Amino acid sequence: MTELSYQLYSSRNFPPLSDTLAMLKRAGYRNVEGYGGVYGDLAGLKQSLDDNGLAMPTGHFGLDMLENERDRVLELAGTLGMKAIYCPYLQAELRPSDAAGWRAFGERLQKAGEPYRKAGYIFGWHNHDFEFVPLADGSVPQELIFDAAPELSWEADIAWVIRGGADPIDWINRYGDRITAVHVKDIAPAGENADEDGWADVGHGTVDWAALIKALRSTPVKYLVMEHDNPGDAERFARRSIETVQRF
């Protein structure tokens, strides 16, 4: 059964975290997704989640931490009851410029995930748009990553797939067996919501989420994670988005 969740990064500009968790409980969420900015006070985070009846089944961890602080990642994931660990990003200055570089990056992700898979966690990559922009030779970085990392799961950020110029239904059809979580966010019509970086609350933009969720039912996706990279009002975004997805 697919569960609904909320990426806490969406509320990073609306502290304190305790207020966000209470707001999410009121809005009907039962799960949240963590990221680097919330792990500092582990005991306090766990207590606040428990106080609000929230679970954190998935979390984002930077590649450097995944490779060099494995014991800390495992401590965080274990204490918080996570089921899946996702690497979320690669800084622009570190991105390869050719196919060989992207294959090597895929191999790096494959290796980085080994201790976490061995410990019983799902381990995957969370995409942005740059992985879908073809290279000079016509190859696509996301394909190269997957080819080089046969055990890599995928947290598919659908709106970023679209912003990268790709067809999300095509990618779901081709790589759906890797999808264990999905970031559910929406893109505002051209020229709108400039103060929110062109994003929209789910169901209030241009992404056909009804069709996408129908397509995703044929995949092993476990978590549908609401996200907005820069909402003007996090409570509005959280409420409207869960209301939309609960209708599908």
Image (tube, rainbow, N blue to C red):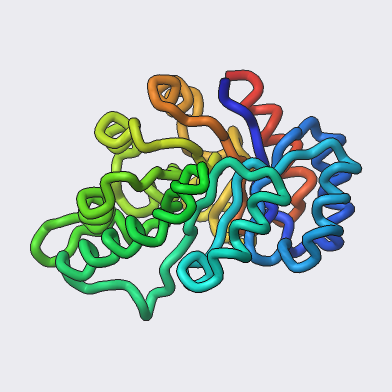
Q: Looking at the picture, tell me which residue is in the foreground, 182 or 237.
A: 182
Question: How many marks are shown on the rendered structure?
Answer: 0
Q: Position of residue 205 (x, y in %)?
A: 54, 40
Q: Position of residue 60 (x, y in %)?
A: 57, 56
For residue 129, side relative to residue 140 (left or right): right
**Quadrant position of residue 82:** top right
Residue drawn where x is 29% and y is 38% of the image:
171
Q: Position of residue 226 (x, y in %)?
A: 62, 41
For residue 84, side relative to residue 140 (left or right): right
Residue drawn where x is 33% and y is 56% of the image:
110
For residue 16, side relative to residue 58 (left or right): right
Quadrant where the image shows the C terminus: top right
Q: Farthest residue in the bottom direction?
A: 93
Residue drawn where x is 51% and y is 42% of the image:
120
Q: Position of residue 30 (x, y in %)?
A: 75, 33
- Would residue 102 be seen by someone viewing this image from the given angle? yes
For residue 37, side relative to residue 229 (left or right): right
Quadrant where the image shows the N terminus: top right
Q: Looking at the picture, tell me which residue is in the foreground, 171 or 145.
A: 145
Residue drawn where x is 86% and y is 58% of the image:
44
- Would residue 157 be seen by someone viewing this image from the given angle? no
Does residue 41 lie above or below 32 as drawn? below
Q: Looking at the picture, tell me which residue is in the foreground, 109 or 168.
A: 109
